[in-house]
Amino acid sequence: EFINVFRIGKEQLLIFMATPIGVHATDLHVGVAIGIAVKLAIHLINGMPLRSLFKPYLDIQPRDDKTCIIHAGGSAVFSNWIPFKHQIEDIGLVQRFNLIIDLSDTRLVDHSVMEKLHELQKEFEQEGLSLELTGLESHRKLSEHPLSTRRRR
């Protein structure tokens, strides 16, 4: 498992190691908090704006009568994923729009969000809809893994 996590990214291995070490050195709650703190610290070092820590900055624009574009700004990270996901699901799966998610204005897209977006792409496909990700060409992958964290150059 350590090798698999390392392939996703060195920062993922650091988080993966900090959590159980913290749990064994203290207790479950403190250990998990240590893992979360390490992940947030890594995100801040990689350029995550503080203002987008818990709130995604999304601009939603209709493209045509079947497609909407969601322009994401700031960062797309685990701590702001839930409201981001609710917007995607509401517009796409509930209102039945195809979606284009433009990530070109994000400074950071973490591994958790990359993984969840790819899972949503499969859900959309099963519903006969499309979910397209754009704007990642201006980001640098932190590893060669297809779902690695990406930081804007």
Image (spheres, rainbow, N blue to C red):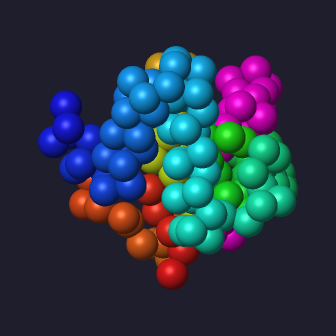
Residue 15 location in percent, x, y? 42, 44
> Which one is in front, 101 or 126?
101
Q: Is residue 123 left or right of residue 92?
A: left
Compared with 100, 118 (above or below) is: above
Query: Where residue 20 sits: x, y (%)?
Result: 38, 29
Instruction: Note whether residue 87 is visible.
Output: yes
Outermost residue toward the left?
3
Which stretch appears magenta? 81-107
Task: Examine the rendered structure and indicate whether residue 139 appears above or below residue 25.
Answer: below
Left or right of residue 4, residue 97 in this image: right
Residue 21 rendering spot, x and y as whole percentages: 37, 33
Indicate whether residue 94 is drawn in magenta. yes
Q: Residue at x 62, y 70 (%)?
A: 47
Q: Is residue 98 visible?
A: no
Q: Please state if 122 lies on the left or on the right of 88 as rendered.
A: left
Q: Depth check: give the residue in front, 21 or 85.
A: 21
Outermost residue, bottom direction?
153
